[in-house]
Image (cartoon, coloured by chain):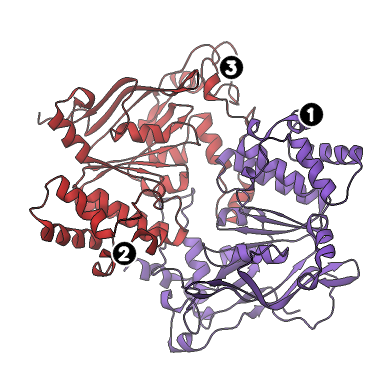
């Protein structure tokens, strides 16, 4: 198939449950989105909202319980083996913790050459090492020769994360899932890593599913892309980044943005705050009926929000919102 | 009034006066110079935030104040004067008994990630009692009353939470329990190390609001240690930027954020994306953090600084007062101010 009407990677009505003891918890419910080649989609939300699970499902590390993951229009879990292998090569993941995601017993050179040799992307070891040097250069670890023989523990957090990115790049991916990839790094290092990831997008046309809890980082990295806000396993708002940041429609997005402290004393001390009706996040074992946000929502309307689950509906500005009150207001 | 050197006698305006503090760790590779000649004064009722990146010495500093450094650490030099009414005592010279009184009754520290340090098999109330008893408070009724008051202030339901086990509370709730517990014996000085790290946005907000409310009500002095510049922007009266174990800039929160004089402070602030406005440009500070075993000669920031001259490589700039309330350790602060720190930006983008 040469046409890709639904983008490079598409998640279609994904549901995912986990068994915890005797309980079945639903971590994702009806999650759909698609990402085009070279596009950035940021997933934001608080811990436990399902961001990481979504990332793992997108990268094929975890099958969905319901729904389809489609790579170039094909359901990846119903593909022939060779096609699945091709999808797994094209979609790579960068994990949050660079201290945990690199094998501590392997030198950088082995970390980078192993996937090259495994996927037969090079003819021999000499070529693999050459390629590894090239990749270290791409992720700004220069001079690359200095890093080849280092073990992960000899590198700083920022350098390790760059090695993780280089490892992901060995197999020439078209799509990177970055799960809180810069969250653990110090601010001065974080920016250069973000700039490096951005350069990959420009130069290699890599698409991103960029997962973060930090809305300001999402704004910076996905300024010409989109943001999807998740709450208790559902996408509650999705749209172009400037719209989500400057004109949030969903009361949860509004609450998040108003609560965020900023590195600007005047702005952060005078910002108007949205008060929620409750501070408690409901347990996934006991998701409220209707709109899962209704027990905390300032716009709550009894009889409406606690009975029907709102689905994502388009409003203006290319934004989709899952909120009865907002979409009704927009329709009128 | 000088921030760097004291005349040796007590100034009642201050609750804490730190003079020329040096702390190092013994490591296999050599001596790690974690805190190098830190001096500052903390006014009663003031909030002072220490900002800086990992390894800049800010946590070591906090641990030194309450003498909880690990065995591999050594205080090489310095004095920490704590004002107790009309007399000042050197925390570093306190013996065991005195220290016990000092900790928690006079100075409470709430550690990073300590919301996970509760005993999982004890109810919150029992842990409160343990703490109180360990510090010589035995009147159960009085403790209960105080705890209920404090819980109200940190927006927790006393009856439910005191009866709960730690696992029944969310991370944010545990953090608020911990803050209340820290204030149990009414300390006049509180040290918070990364109080909101690892908390979600909405929880973080509630902790920040609680802290602000508590400060207004209880009037304690607060030392805030954080890598999070937005937290300091929210809560601090004054901010100290730390780099390589030194205070490189110390000023009011407004001056630090709107008129930073040190290139490193400029870099830190402009490396954080904001929500308002367009995408904006961010600074990425080139190079990597200094090696504290072999710190650079001269100004420790010189290898990463676009303002570096020969002098910076040879001579270390002292923390000097450029106005009565603004101190900076940089030979070129006038140039930094004149250019609005623009050079940090250009170098990063080049």
Disc 1 residue crowd, few under 14, some 14–19, many 20+, Cα 10 Å: few
For the point 83% across and 46% down, the residue is B132
For the point 46% across and 47% down, the residue is A216
Q: Position of residue A59 (x, y in %)?
A: 29, 36
Mark 1 in CB contact with mark 2 (< 8 angstroms): no
Give the left or right position of residue A64, taking residue B38 as reference. left
Q: Chain of mark 2?
A: A
Between marks 3 and 2 in the image, the one whose residue lies nearer the viewer:
2
Q: CA distance from mark 1 to mark 2?
A: 55 Å
Question: Which residue is identified by label 1?
Answer: B159
Q: CA distance from mark 3 to mark 2?
A: 59 Å
Q: Which chain is red?
A: A
Q: Give the position of the N terminus of chain A as an image quadrant.
A: top left
Between marks 1 and 3 in the image, the one whose residue lies nearer the viewer:
1
Q: Nearer the viewer, residue A266 or B162?
A: B162
Give the left or right position of residue B244, taking residue A116 as reference. right
Q: Chain of mark 1?
A: B
State the hue of chain B.
purple
> Which mark identifies residue A150?
2
Q: Position of residue A88 (x, y in %)?
A: 22, 37
Whichever of callouts 3 and 2 sits on the residue coming sooner in the sequence is 2
> Which mark identifies residue A301?
3
Q: Is residue B123 above or below residue A124?
A: above
Task: Please tell me how many numbered marks the rendered image carries.
Answer: 3
Q: CA distance from mark 1 to mark 3?
A: 31 Å
Q: Position of residue B262 (x, y in %)?
A: 53, 73
For the point 46% across and 72% down, the residue is B290
Work out which residue is located at the far left of the displayed protein and give it.
A123
Give the left or right position of residue A252, taking residue B286 as reference. right
Q: Nearer the viewer, residue A144 or B318?
A: A144
**Image quarter for residue B123?**
top right
């Amino acid at each position: 198939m040469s046409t890709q009407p639904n983008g490079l990677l598409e998640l279609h009505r994904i549901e995912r449950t986990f068994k915890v003891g005797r309980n079945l918890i639903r971590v994702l419910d009806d999650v759909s989105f698609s990402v085009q080649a070279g596009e950035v989609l940021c997933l934001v939300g608080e811990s436990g909202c399902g961001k990481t699970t979504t990332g793992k499902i997108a990268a094929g590390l975890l099958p969905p319980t319901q729904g389809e993951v489609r790579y170039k229009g094909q359901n990846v879990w119903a593909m022939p083996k060779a096609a699945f292998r091709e999808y797994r090569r094209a979609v790579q993941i960068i994990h949050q913790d660079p201290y945990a995601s690199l094998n501590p017993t392997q030198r950088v050179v082995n970390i980078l050459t192993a996937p090259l040799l495994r996927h037969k992307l090079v003819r021999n070891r000499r070529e693999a090492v050459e390629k590894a040097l090239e990749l270290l250069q791409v992720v700004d670890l220069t001079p690359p020769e200095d890093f080849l023989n280092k073990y992960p523990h000899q590198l700083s957090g920022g350098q390790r994360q760059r090695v993780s990115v280089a490892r992901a790049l060995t197999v020439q991916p078209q799509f990177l899932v970055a799960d809180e990839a810069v969250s653990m790094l110090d601010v001065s290092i974080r920016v250069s890593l973000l700039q490096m990831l951005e350069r990959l997008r420009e130069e290699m046309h890599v698409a991103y599913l960029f997962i973060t809890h930090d809305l300001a980082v999402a704004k910076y990295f996905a300024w010409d892309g989109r943001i999807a806000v998740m709450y208790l396993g559902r996408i509650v708002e999705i749209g172009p980044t400037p719209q989500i940041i400057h004109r949030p429609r969903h009361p949860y997005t509004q609450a998040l943005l108003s609560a965020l402290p900023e590195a600007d004393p005047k702005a952060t001390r005078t910002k108007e705050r949205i008060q929620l009706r409750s501070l408690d996040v409901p347990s996934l074992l006991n998701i409220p009926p209707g709109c899962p946000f209704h027990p905390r929502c300032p716009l709550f309307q009894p009889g409406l929000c606690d009975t029907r689950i709102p689905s994502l509906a388009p409003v203006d500005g290319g934004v989709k919102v899952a909120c009865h009150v907002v979409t009704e207001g927009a329709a009128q | 009034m000088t921030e760097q050197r004291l005349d040796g006698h007590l100034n009642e305006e201050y609750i804490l006066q730190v003079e020329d503090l040096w702390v190092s760790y013994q490591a296999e590779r050599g001596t790690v110079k974690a805190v190098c000649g830190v001096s500052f004064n903390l006014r009663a009722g003031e909030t002072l935030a220490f900002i800086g990146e990992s390894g800049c010495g800010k946590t070591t500093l906090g641990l030194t104040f309450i003498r909880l450094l690990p065995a591999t650490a050594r205080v090489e030099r310095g004095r920490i004067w704590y004002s107790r009414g009309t007399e000042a005592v050197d925390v570093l010279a306190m013996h065991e008994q005195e220290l016990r009184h000092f900790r928690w009754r006079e100075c409470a520290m709430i550690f990073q990630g300590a919301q996970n340090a509760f005993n999982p098999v004890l109810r919150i109330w029992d842990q409160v009692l343990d703490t109180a008893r360990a510090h010589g408070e035995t009147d159960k009724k009085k403790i209960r009353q105080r705890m209920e008051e404090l819980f109200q202030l940190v927006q927790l339901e006393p009856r439910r939470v005191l009866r709960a086990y730690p696992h029944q509370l969310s991370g944010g709730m545990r953090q608020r329990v911990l803050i209340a517990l820290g204030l149990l014996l009414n300390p006049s000085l509180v040290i918070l190390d990364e109080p909101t790290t690892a908390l979600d946005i909405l929880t973080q907000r509630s902790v920040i609001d609680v802290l602000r409310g508590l400060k207004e009500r209880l009037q304690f002095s607060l030392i805030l240690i954080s890598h999070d510049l937005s937290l300091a922007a929210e809560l601090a009266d004054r901010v100290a930027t730390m780099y390589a174990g030194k205070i490189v800039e110390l000023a009011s929160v407004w001056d630090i954020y709107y008129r930073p004089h040190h290139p490193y402070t400029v870099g830190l602030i402009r490396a954080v994306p904001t929500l308002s406005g367009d995408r904006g440009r961010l600074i990425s500070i080139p190079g990597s953090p200094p090696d504290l075993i072999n710190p650079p000669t001269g100004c420790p920031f010189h290898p990463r600084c676009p303002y570096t001259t020969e002098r910076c490589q040879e001579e270390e700039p002292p923390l000097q007062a450029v106005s009565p309330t603004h101190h900076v350790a940089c030979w070129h602060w006038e140039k930094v101010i004149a250019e609005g720190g623009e050079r940090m930006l250009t170098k990063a983008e080049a």
